[in-house]
Image (cartoon, helix red, strand yellow):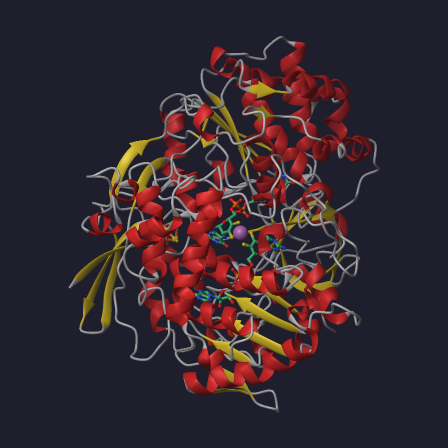
Amino acid sequence: MEHRITCPLCEAMCGLRVTVEGHTVGAVRGNPEDVWSRGHLCPKGASLKQIHEDPDRLRLPMVRRRDGEHVQVSWDDAFAEAETVLRPVLDRHGAGAVSVYIGNPVAHNLGLETYVGALVGLAGAAGMPAYYTPGTVDQWPLNVVSALLFGGMWNAPIPDLDRTDHLMMLGANPSASQGSMLSAPDIMGRLAAIRERGGTVVVVDPRRTQTARRATEWVPVRPGTDALLLFALLHTLEERNWIRRPRHLDDMVAGLDDVVALSAEFSPERVAAATGIAAETIRRLAAGLADAESPVIYSRIGTCTQEFGTLATWLVFVLNVALGSVDRSGGAVFPKAAVWSPMFMKPPDQDGPGWQFGRFRSRVRGAPEVLGQFPISCLAEEIDTPGDGQIRALITVAGNPAISAPGARRLDAALGGLEAMISVDNWLNETTRHAHVILPGLSPLERAHCDDLYWMYSIASCVKWSDAVLPAAVGRPAEWEIMLRLAGAVVGTPIPEVDTAALDDLYTQGIVHTACQASDTPLFGRDPTEVFAALRGRGPERMIDLGIRTGPWGDDLGRRPGGLTLDEVRRHPDGLRLGELEGGRLSEVLTTPSHRIELMHPLLTADIPRLLSRIDRASDGLVLTSRRHLRSNNSWLHNVAGLMRGRDRCTLLINPTDAAHLGVSDGRPVDVSTTEGSIRVPAEVTDEMMPGVVSLPHGWGHGVDGTQMSVANAHPGVNTNVLNPAALIDVPSNTQVVNGVPCQVVPVPAAG
Ligand SMILES: Nc1nc2c(c(=O)[nH]1)N[C@H]1C(S)=C(S)[C@@H](COP(=O)(O)OP(=O)(O)OC[C@H]3O[C@@H](n4cnc5c(=O)[nH]c(N)nc54)[C@H](O)[C@@H]3O)O[C@H]1N2
Ligand SMILES: Nc1nc2c(c(=O)[nH]1)N[C@H]1C(S)=C(S)[C@@H](COP(=O)(O)OP(=O)(O)OC[C@H]3O[C@@H](n4cnc5c(=O)[nH]c(N)nc54)[C@H](O)[C@@H]3O)O[C@H]1N2
Ligand code: SF4
Ligand SMILES: [Mo]
């Protein structure tokens, strides 16, 4: 039997065909009929069978015995044990001593994505001070800039890849990542198509990645200085009178002249030394953008997780405005998501017309919150620093912060000291080894899937629903039910006694209620009782039914007969393609107070002096950056043997000039150190790195005691976040700096 599903492993959302004989998975192939991806597939998607069959993947919960060893137990015993460890903390200290860490796979997991909100929502209402996510080692600058400029933190235009004639890309390597905050199947094919139709692709990156190799031009940039480059581009556009002020943006933009005025200080000559890019190159890049019919600039993690991530991300959108490209075909266009998600609502605690920042501070370092979050590196100190409000219990949900958070050593130690730790996770790994109880979810082939968030960043309007390929074992709870159980526990019900069906109704009613009162939702003004009664099913299916039916093609809960419902979407296993990326949507998508794109904000301008002081700063010497690989997924696909074949990927990339200068030889170990820590790793000498910059992949550092990852542990690699300092932050957004970190590299003398 053949199933048609959507791959839940990355933002490309490829359609797959999975054959099954009995309960055994046969082949996994790209689905050529999928309306969205037309057959595209990468090695990760092809390994879903191996992920499912991984003998190390947990099928039963585990509890940690006194001697530290984890043993398998029944679900009843696991829930009882979770209650036993969690309740005393709640009784003694209340929810103020509890926190939650929400990891990356949550965004690709229907049940977790729709129900993790129940856990953090109820825990927050009960007094949990903050929850943590890898957002602050990822896209938080984009969220901040989206909120300020466009009104919603998940509301931003994406490059119209299929129509642009000039794409400038900074800090992104889709040849590995397959696209991020930009969903486009076969993104490399689309970049090639830009060049085939006579267009230009410019890649700004300290590393000549596979993406850069296939571009028209690679521009090596000194890490952390993109904001200087972007300001100098704006400066040049102004100087040459190349700023475009098209009619469609006339009344829709506020503050362009003010930002242009700020760019006066950033001439190409002035930023050349700091960025490592010659003034004439900057002027030529500006001319390339100005000459293009439909230029667009896109940036991603390399320009977020750096010293000036917020300013760089802001300036990308400023330039897209200055080039007249925003909301215009071929430029930076707002996708029209077919599925509405409650995530898109402004959080109810942000009740004013604008966005508030710094409404509360972290206990230990006094970090101001940004969009409700502290830097991820605060988690360790909040756990290991005694006092009122100390975190004593942690729930991790599909996350591996022991590897993914900067200052990783301290966090690893802190996790070991928790009074209660519960992990909802499918493997016994570097983080979950500290958990008193591990509650595993189903494999990607055992659960239904439907994306919501990523359609907000997609190059076409589609909707797809995937039923589970294989049945789950009898009695296994779904992850959304686990979320409800833990949520119920935090507000007082013993975990085994939580009535998940009743709590599901309450939670869904709560969301409906809030959405009916929020002016930025399609439910605004409607009767919540009526809305709830119109929904079908329960759990995540009901949530997605709500999202589809209130989306632009939905049946508006019965008011638009013939419109989409989840039932209708299910009848189309190859998906529904509803519309293409189109400009002309600005007035519909902006939710800023002025109903314009607001380019200026004190949070942004307050950071300009810090950027100016970067211009004349003496060289940082050698700096460390991060990278990804096509055959990994952050920290958790190293247990798939098929993806681990080939040579060691956890190496320090270093330019031949630096290597010669430091006495580093290819393939030989080096000691890398920073103010935070040091590690030993093999060097890979390659001119794909610009001089002065080294690169390590993130997500490694396996082989730790007490883990059950036989393949990963045989190829452990080292954890780059042992090196990335907890205290290095992009100030306005609370984002950790993992690109441009000063480091020393010393060759390890050969033994004997
Ligand atoms: N130095 C440096 N650090 C970085 C980055 C970097 O570029 N450089 N990148 C950052 C970024 S962008 C991110 S997103 C983070 C990632 O940070 P995390 O989200 O903390 O880490 P992941 O490696 O994605 O961990 C995924 C976890 O989910 C579990 N898991 C996998 N599938 C499932 C499932 O279906 N259900 C459940 N319950 N669990 C599951 C895995 O076992 C693993 O424990 O790392 C960040 N850290
Ligand atoms: N196969 C695979 N796919 C993934 C993931 C994975 O681990 N493996 N992770 C997923 C996740 S969670 C995310 S967030 C996305 C991220 O997706 P991308 O943003 O495309 O991330 P990377 O592939 O890490 O590319 C970042 C690039 O930034 C460059 N860079 C570093 N510092 C700077 C700088 O200061 N300036 C500039 N201009 N460039 C810099 C790096 O050299 C690198 O080439 O990928 C997702 N997709
Ligand atoms: S590109 Fe992403 S969605 Fe497509 S098969 Fe690979 S991992 Fe899955
Ligand atoms: Mo990420």
Q: Is residue 149 left or right of residue 232?
A: left
Above or below, comparing residue 749 to residue 242 in the picture? below
What residue appears at the point 36 percent right and 30 percent down from the top-left corner? 581
Above or below, comparing residue 588 to residue 238 in the picture? below
On-image quarter of the N terminus? bottom left
Residue 519: percent from left, percent from top = 48, 37
What residue appears at the point 45 percent right and 19 percent down from the top-left corner? 294
- Occupied quadrant, residue 175: top left
Residue 434: percent from left, percent from top = 60, 77
Q: Is residue 484 left or right of residue 740?
A: left
Residue 315: percent from left, percent from top = 63, 29
Above or below, comparing residue 477 to residue 633 in the picture? below
Above or below, comparing residue 330 to residue 33 in the picture? above
- Asked if residue 177 shows in the view, the reply is no
Q: Nearer the viewer, residue 284 or 389?
A: 389
What residue appears at the point 45 percent right and 76 percent down from the top-left corner? 498
Q: Nearer the viewer, residue 350 or 696?
A: 350
On-image quarter of the C terminus? bottom right
